[in-house]
Amino acid sequence: MKNGKFSLFYPFKPEKSLVSMYHVIFVILIILFGGILLLAGFFSESGLLLAGSAVLLLIVVALYLFWIGKYYQTIFFELKDDEVTWKRGVWFRMTGIVPYDRITNIDIYQGPLMRFFGFSSIKLQTAGYSAQARSEIILEGIREAEDLRETIRSLIRKSRTVAGPSDATGTPARQETPHPTDDSLVGEIRAIRLLLENQFRK
């Protein structure tokens, strides 16, 4: 199945502008918290405290610049024939798998910065998470979010068609045993009555 760049068994990454959004958020945080830290050091009239605050901020910036590039390189999403998978992490590697037949909601989210950079996030909720209003997987940095959502929907429909109907937890539902029709019940009662009558005649 192909839908743009969202092909089966073809890992894809978020848009590179996701990193730019992280840069903006980081700069805002540095201005807020770093500014407070530097002002505290300045008004304390302690040169040592001011120098320590500046060094601490430089270390935080250096760690962030080292981390963000490597973090982006580790993010991968992949659509398979029966599940969605993801992996990410620099120091702590994380992976996740969500079968299509467990997905209950596919929501697209776009905040102000996402709108500015031209991408969205797709939140996949499953039967076990929807009651808590939590997402089991967030596919972030997706530019063609509607295309990806439709691709996942078609894979969900295909998965459920192959596996049969499922209950709220994604488990295949137990097939109901067909009940005998009224005509067959009447026929069985007549047969029993005839047997009893024959027994009494003897």
Image (cartoon, rainbow, N blue to C red):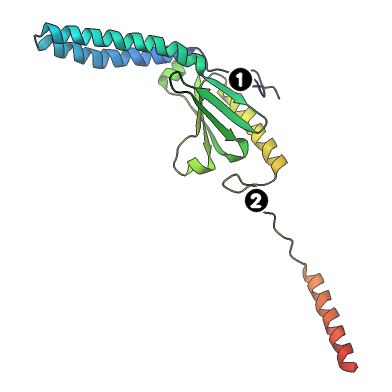
Q: Residue at x 48, y 23 (%)?
A: 93
Task: Locate residue 177, reporting x and y percent.
Answer: 72, 60
Q: Which residue is drawn at 41% across and 20% down?
A: 112
Circle 2: element type: loop
From the viewer's perspective, is residue 29 above or below residue 146?
above
Q: Check disc 1 and report the residue beneath it.
A: 11
**Which amino acid does the dot numbered 1 rest on?**
Pro
Tell me if residue 18 can be seen. no
Q: Return the residue nearer the eye: 54 or 159.
A: 54
From the viewer's perspective, is residue 170 above or below residue 70?
below
Disc on the earlier residue, 2 or 1: 1
In the shown orientation, is residue 72 left or right of residue 150? left
Could you tell me which quadrant the N terminus lies in? top right
Dot 2 crowding, Cα within 10 Å, few <14, some 14–19, many 20+: few
Tell me if residue 81 can be seen. yes
Q: How many marks?
A: 2
Q: Return the residue nearer the eye: 200 or 179.
A: 200
CA separation in Å, label 2 and label 1: 32 Å
In the shown orientation, is residue 114 left or right of residue 192? left
Residue 173: assigned label? 2
Task: Locate residue 2, reporting x and y percent.
Answer: 69, 22
**Which amino acid does the dot numbered 2 rest on?**
Ala
